[in-house]
């Protein structure tokens, strides 16, 4: 069908269907939008939601440090319309408005506690959003992409979607009664028949393929890009984009047709335009949008959303960054299993930064990750308390650093010339020490590349690898054994401390997007001023590279206690207990 359409003379002259803007632009925008999905308010937030928000927050903070500016916009918020919310409010014996107010506030509070640096928190019940959705809908209608049709199919309320026959199956419940359920989510579906507005999604199969072929990094990681290509090779039926208002009152009415409510996913996706000022001011940012999404909502973001945008004459977002899910002790989180992990309880147990670190260090976007208390405790203890905290402790301890300063660096002890192959160089440094200097020098680039590729866990892995090398350096030279009375040994001891403090300064700067509070504590202890913490200040070991160092001889900052106190294994309670 779409082939016939796109090959006809009329269609060819109207090609591309979203107008010439997309074809002609390609200019990188200065400002960008990083977005989280907007969260359903049918239940309180859990660690999966927090993970989506943390990924977005770390990217946003990283961008800010790179640019030295605002880092652009970070939008999050709540998705408040739809049958699911209408039913949950009814079950709770309250109005949808009150229900949404209370759960939306919980998300906002959680994100405040978690340090999510959002610049906008949108609720789909706000008037600015209604206006954007109405305008978007009217544009689709005026451009001829909507039509009315009798629609029938299996409707899955938790997924807020009609499903094809191939997407459902029959399964017995605990009493042995057969129910039709969604193959993907396992939720029960109901046969639904109604007059709806349909979006001509089928016409976008080819434009979507073209978009993806020309933008191979538009969906990251690759695995999910391939998945979308596979979907696009199958049939792409038109999409029902409204619901009978008798069945769904809790939503935005179709402009000019009060018998229909706009489909909650169209309503929700438009939030990304609302936050950039659509329909008046979005061109300043759009399409420089980076959507962080979980794998369960990939189809909505990688197929429906770009197609809707093209139909409305707008470009698809620049990137869709996809992550997998958190399971708990090998099981999917669910209310019925009682294993939903409460992020606030985790903050109490591990501290906010401890838990941020755990999720971002262990979460690998390509595959699901499993959460259990012991794993989280072991990780933060070994990496934050022992490796990083221990290093800071050692080189700031009065016994080793009695002057409480950033000591001087000696070129004699650690000469710049290449290390001689035949054993020692002219100074005290060994081959491994030169390797450490080179690793830490390359670290910012590695970290930036990992962030760019949406592999924050890899950035943390590289930092931890350098932290371990730095501990090895300290251990190898045991500066506590050097004689302070011998000037040559003293110079060497100061040089060791200078190098370790420089390494720590780099780690502190690079860790800010992930553990902002701990990084602040670390940098403050080193005496690094708030104006000296952006990526342009990295300038690692400038004395070794023959330049001045603003830190040499500077007093360390005040000692505010352990960087990260070791955690005990919780005896009675875990964060998964509800
Ligand atoms: N409201 C829609 C999104 C609309 S965006 C235009 C929605 N909401 S949600 O609350 O169900 O999910 C929000 C995000 O949380 C999704 O990215 C989803 O993948 C993520 N997570 C929900 N459970 C999760 C895990 N167990 N693990 C990791 N993330 C998961 O979908």
Image: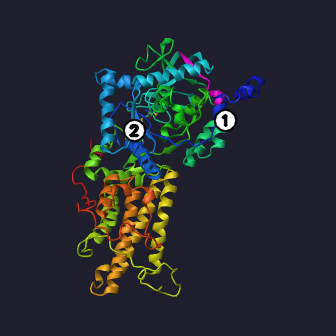
- Label 1, label 2: how many angstroms apart (C-alpha)? 30 Å
Q: Where is residue 484 in the image (x, y as percent from the top left)?
A: 27, 83
Compared across the picture, whether 210 is left or right of 89 comes to right
Please tell me the numbered disc located at residue 552.
none
Considering every residue shown, the one lying at the far right of the view is: 9
Q: Position of residue 161 (x, y in %)?
A: 50, 27
- Image quadrant holding the N terminus, namely top right
- Give yes or no for residue 172 being in the magenta stretch: no
Nearer to us in this view, 2 or 278: 278
Report crowding for label 1: few under 14, some 14 to 19, many 20 or more residues within 10 A (C-alpha).
few
Q: Does residue 175 appear left or right of residue 447 in this picture?
A: left
Look at the image and give the residue range highlighted in magenta: 195-206
Q: Is residue 153 visible?
A: no
- Can you identify the residue that label 2 sits on? 119
**Residue at horizontal 33 percent and vertical 27 percent from the top:** 100
Q: Check contact, mark 1 vs mark 2: CB within 8 A.
A: no
In the rendered image, the vertical position of residue 505 relative to residue 72, given as above or below: below
Q: Nearer the viewer, residue 475 or 487?
A: 487
In the rendered structure, which disc, 1 or 2, sits on the residue that comes first in sequence? Answer: 1
Looking at the image, which residue is at 26% across and 61% down? 566
**Residue at left offset 28%, top offset 61%:** 563
Pinpoint residue 230: horizontal percent, then vertical percent. 62, 40
Mark 1, secondary structure of its residue: helix
Query: Which residue position is annotated with label 1?
Result: 23
Q: Which residue is drawn at 26% across and 76% down?
A: 400
């Amino acid at each position: 069908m779409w082939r016939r359409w796109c090959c006809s003379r009329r269609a060819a002259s109207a090609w591309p269907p979203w107008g010439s803007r997309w074809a002609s632009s390609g200019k990188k925008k200065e400002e960008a939008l990083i977005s989280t999905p907007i969260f359903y308010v049918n239940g309180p937030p859990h660690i999966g939601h927090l993970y989506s928000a943390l990924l977005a927050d770390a990217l946003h903070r990283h961008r800010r440090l790179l640019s030295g500016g605002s880092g652009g916009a970070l939008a999050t918020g709540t998705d408040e319309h739809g049958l699911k919310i209408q039913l949950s409010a009814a079950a709770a014996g309250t109005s949808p408005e009150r229900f949404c107010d209370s759960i939306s506030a919980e998300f906002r509070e959680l994100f405040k506690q978690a340090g999510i640096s959002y610049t906008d928190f949108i609720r789909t019940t706000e008037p600015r959003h209604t206006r954007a959705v109405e305008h978007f809908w009217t544009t689709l209608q005026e451009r001829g992409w909507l039509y009315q049709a009798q629609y029938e199919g299996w409707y899955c309320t938790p997924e807020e979607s009609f499903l094809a026959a191939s997407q459902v199956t029959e399964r017995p419940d605990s009493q042995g009664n057969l129910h039709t359920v969604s193959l993907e989510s396992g939720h029960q579906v109901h046969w639904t028949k109604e007059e709806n507005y349909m979006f001509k999604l089928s016409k976008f199969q080819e434009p979507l393929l073209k978009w993806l072929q020309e933008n191979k990094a538009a969906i990251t990681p690759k695995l999910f890009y391939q998945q979308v290509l596979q979907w696009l090779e199958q049939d792409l039926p038109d999409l029902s984009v409204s619901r009978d208002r008798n069945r769904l009152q809790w939503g935005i009415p179709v402009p000019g047709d009060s018998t229909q409510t706009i489909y909650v996913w169209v309503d929700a996706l438009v939030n990304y335009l609302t936050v950039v000022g659509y329909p008046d001011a979005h061109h300043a940012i759009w399409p420089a949008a980076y959507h962080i999404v979980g794998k369960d909502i990939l189809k909505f973001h990688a197929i429906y959303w770009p197609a809707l945008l093209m139909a409305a004459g707008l470009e698809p977002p620049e990137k869709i960054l996809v992550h997998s899910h958190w399971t708990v002790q090998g099981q999917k989180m669910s209310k019925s299993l009682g294993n939903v992990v409460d992020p606030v309880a985790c903050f109490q147990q591990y501290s906010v930064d401890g838990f941020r670190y755990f999720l971002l260090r262990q979460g690998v976007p390509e595959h699901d990750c499993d959460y259990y208390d012991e794993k989280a405790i072991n990780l933060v203890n070994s990496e934050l308390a022992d490796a990083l905290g221990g290093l800071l402790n050692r080189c700031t301890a009065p016994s080793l650093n009695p002057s409480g300063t950033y000591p001087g660096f000696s070129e004699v002890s650690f000469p710049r010339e290449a290390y001689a192959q035949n054993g020692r160089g002219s100074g005290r440094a060994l081959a491994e020490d030169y390797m450490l200097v080179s690793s830490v020098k390359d670290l910012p680039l590695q970290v930036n590349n990992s962030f760019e590729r949406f592999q924050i866990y890899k950035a943390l892995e590289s930092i931890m690898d350098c932290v371990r090398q730095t501990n090895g350096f300290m251990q190898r030279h045991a500066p506590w054994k050097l004689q302070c009375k011998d000037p040559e040994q003293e110079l060497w001891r100061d040089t060791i401390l200078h190098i370790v403090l420089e390494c720590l300064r780099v780690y502190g700067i690079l860790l800010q997007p992930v553990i902002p509070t701990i990084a602040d504590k670390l940098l403050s202890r080193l005496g690094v001023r708030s104006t000296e913490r952006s990526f342009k200040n990295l300038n690692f070991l400038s004395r070794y590279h023959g330049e001045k160092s603003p830190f040499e001889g500077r007093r360390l900052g005040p000692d505010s206690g352990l960087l990260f106190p070791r955690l005990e294994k919780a005896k009675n309670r875990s964060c998964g207990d509800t």
